[in-house]
Image (cartoon, grey):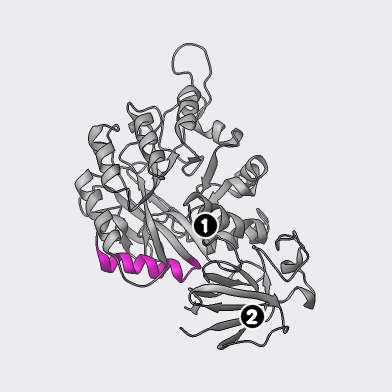
Amino acid sequence: MTRTTIVNARILEGNDPGGPAGESGRGGAPGAADGPEGLRDLLLGEGRILRISPAGRTPPEGVVIDAEGARAASGYVDIHTHGGAGADVMDADSEGLGRIARFHLSNGTTTFLATTLTAPLDRIRAALDTVRAYRGGGARIAGVHLEGPFLSPANAGAQEKRFLRAPDTEALRFVADNADILRRVTLAPELPGALDLIAECAARGIGVSAGHDASVDDEIEAAIETGLSCVTHIYCCSSTISRRTGPRKHLGLTELGMADPRLAVEVIADGRHVPDALFRLILRAKGRDSICLVSDSIRVAGMPDGEYRLGDPGTEVRVRKEGDEASVPDLGVYAGSVMPLGAMVRRLVAGGAASLEDAVHMASAVPARLAGLSDRGRIAEGLLADINLLAEDGSVLRTFLGGQAT
């Protein structure tokens, strides 16, 4: 395989062996320095980052690409996306899956979890089988995020209520049968059987997130003790303070997600689902290590304004895209976002809601960790050579997948 050397780059997020010990390229560390001493050369080969060295110290090998001082950051990892470019994971169509993968790669996302929607199990199984068999191009598909059908009808959002169900024996068997492809499951913690399903997932190394729920603190605490580790798109269909019975106030998933250090939180940072002022609050409360940017993009992402279908061909949910919004007019709710992670990083930086370093960290290192992908998410020797070259404003200038320019 041809080797590539990226010369004169600045490492934004990662381990920089060319700098002083203990520094990692964040906020003024050697990889992010503005002077020439901060420039690095990255040798890529065999799909990995083979060497990181101070610029000019070692002769370049293979194809030479001059980054001209651009920031070298990990390719983004999106653990919650339903589609884009007119296709949805629930279409269970290989060609459509390819369009989704190419759409995300063109926007700086090099890895994603194909995310399903609430539907009968046989239709979800068809989507999983399509992901399992996919051998096409575009961004890497690291597995599936199962969002539904184990959700609350009281907080379903755009999910189809008629197909919601509580976890039962069939659900446990479904997860066990598909453990090879499932990386995350979103469920409502208050549902009967939820703890059994969380335990099943934990035993099989499948991450569990809570969302689309009507749960209260006692139920959420039990779920955390069993293996719950994340909140699905916080402030978007996550339960809040309530009085279920009597005068006692119960904290909901939103409040516990903000307060409990054991829980990471997904955030749809498109300025619609979570306004920038709210994003600043989340960042202050959680810190960048517990925030995972997700697109939650649907088929309308990258498409012209108009009317579209949400999910698989059997759905009755219709979505209208207008500019940067996608909503279900009949329900008066958002249906998902139209914005890939690359655009989210750029707009967070442009609006001052997050620094470039923090935005990239929340779009790469954190989601890679939550997905159990230890071989990506940072710039370091030995990791996958999935790299974005970024401008100062967060714009993606160029993307490398496995060391190959895309």
Going by the image, does 111 lie left or right of 25?
A: left
Residue 67 numbered tag: 2
The segment highlighted magenta reads 93-109
Confirm whether the magenta stretch covers residue 309: no
| Kind of residue indicated by mark 2 | Ala
Q: Position of residue 283 (x, y in %)?
A: 64, 46
As displayed, is residue 266 above or below residue 99?
above
Circle 2 SS class:
loop
Residue under the image location 66 percent in, 54 percent down:
354
Q: Report the front residue among 21 and 70.
A: 21
Task: Kindly report which numbered mark, 2 or 1, lies closer to the viewer in this rendering.
Answer: 1
Q: Position of residue 203 (x, y in %)?
A: 39, 39
As displayed, is residue 191 above or below residue 280?
above
Quarter location, residue 264: top right
Q: Report the front residue among 367 and 340.
A: 367
Q: Which residue is mark 1?
A: 374
